[in-house]
Image: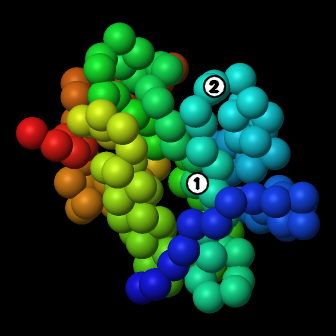
């Protein structure tokens, strides 16, 4: 599955905001509009559109960790993953996770990548586990925190 992560621009941000998850996933992920607003308050946060060819299929957000382990050197957070309802089930989520892992691995002094998910989101739990994230035994705002070591 080939995808690219592209910077949002004045010409593409509204298309990104219009993407939406399936109805039964609405409680699992914030809207892209909320995510873009939140990113303004976390220095170093990276927001990217997920493209399959020339079609925008999703959105990701990641950057230096400000919540999961804020005092841990080299900690980064994978804050958002959303694939539009019309493009789910095609491997784009797994490919987007792999692209984010590669991007963070190349960031200065990155050592570990954290993310979290709502316990009821069993699909996310399986997906993150399949790419190597492991439970930390901690939660944040009711979400299960998982981690992926990036470098020894």
The image's colour scheme reads rainbow
Q: Which residue was labeled with disc 2?
A: 42
Left or right of 69 on screen, residue 27: right
Residue 50 percent coordinates (x, y) = 61, 68
Q: Who's the residue at 22% across and 24% down the image? A: 137
Q: Quadrant of the N terminus?
A: bottom left
Neighbor class of circle 2 (other Cα within 10 Å; few <14, some 14-19, many 20+) is few
Which of the two discs, 2 and 1, labels the residue nearer the N terminus?
A: 2
Disc number for residue 60: 1
Residue 112 place in picture, x, y as percent: 27, 36
Secondary structure beneath label 2: loop
**Which type of secondary structure does the marked residue at label 1 adopt?**
strand
Quadrant of the snapshot with the C terminus: top left
User: In this picture, is 22 found above or below 106?
Assistant: below
The residue shown at (90%, 66%) is 11
Question: Residue 133 at x, y = what percent?
Answer: 25, 47
- Of residues 128 and 150, which is closer to you in this image? 150
**Label of residue 117 in the image:** none
Name above or below for residue 120 compared with residue 76. below
Between disc 2 and disc 1, the foreground one is 2
């Amino acid at each position: 599955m080939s995808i690219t992560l592209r910077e949002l621009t004045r010409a593409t941000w509204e298309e990104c905001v219009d993407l939406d998850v399936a109805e039964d996933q609405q409680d699992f992920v914030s809207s892209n509009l909320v995510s873009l607003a939140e990113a303004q308050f976390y220095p170093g946060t990276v927001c990217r559109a997920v493209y399959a060819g020339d079609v925008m299929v999703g959105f990701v957000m990641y950057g230096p960790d400000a919540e999961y382990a804020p005092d841990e050197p080299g900690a980064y957070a994978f804050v958002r993953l959303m694939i539009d309802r019309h493009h789910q089930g095609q491997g784009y989520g797994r490919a987007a996770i792999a692209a984010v892992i590669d991007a963070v691995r190349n960031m200065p002094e990155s050592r570990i990548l954290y993310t979290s998910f709502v316990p009821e989101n069993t699909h996310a739990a399986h997906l993150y586990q399949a790419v190597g994230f492991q439970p930390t035994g901690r939660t944040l705002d009711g979400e299960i925190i998982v981690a992926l070591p990036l470098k020894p």
